[in-house]
């Protein structure tokens, strides 16, 4: 398990979020949340963040869509 997945798990615990709650809020499959929390497929998140940085996109701009 890497640092990112540990952070995800800690934040979910702190906010009393289950995988289902996160999945419903992000409109994604619960299995995706599970993979992220277990350190799998995190490269997708990291690549998305890299793309946002590269294109100078603020997360708030994306969220508006």
Image (spheres, rainbow, N blue to C red):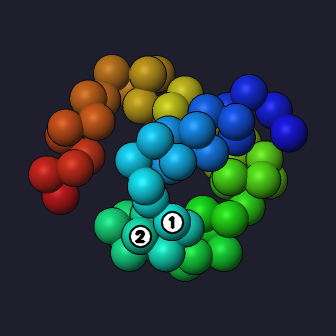
- Residue at 68% over, 65% down: 34
Residue 45 appears in the picture as rendered? no
Question: Relative to 11, is 65 above or below?
Answer: below
Left or right of residue 1: residue 33: left
Under tag 2, what secondary structure? helix
Q: Which residue is mark 2?
A: 21
- Residue at 61% over, 33% down: 7
- Residue at 38% over, 64% down: 26
Residue 49 appears in the picture as rendered? yes
Left or right of residue 52: residue 31: right
Along the line of sight, the residue nearer the viewer: 2 or 48: 2
* CB atoms of marks 1 and 2 within 8 Å: yes
Along the line of sight, the residue nearer the viewer: 18 or 3: 18
Q: CA distance from mark 1 to mark 2?
A: 5 Å
Question: Relative to 7, is 42 above or below?
Answer: below
Question: Relative to 10, is 63 above or below?
Answer: below
Mark 1, Cα crowd under 10 Å, few <14 / some 14-19 / many 20+, is some
Q: Quadrant of residue 29?
A: bottom right
- Residue at 51% over, 66% down: 18
Q: Quadrant of residue 10?
A: top right
The image shows residue 6 at horizontal and vertical percentages of: 70, 36
Residue 18 is tagged as 1
């Amino acid at each position: 398990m890497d640092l990112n997945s540990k952070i995800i798990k800690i934040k979910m615990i702190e906010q009393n979020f289950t995988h289902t709650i996160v999945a419903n809020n992000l409109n994604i499959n619960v299995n995706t949340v599970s993979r992220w929390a277990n350190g799998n497929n995190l490269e997708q998140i990291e690549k998305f963040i890299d793309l946002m940085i590269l294109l100078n996109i603020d997360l708030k701009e994306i969220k508006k869509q």
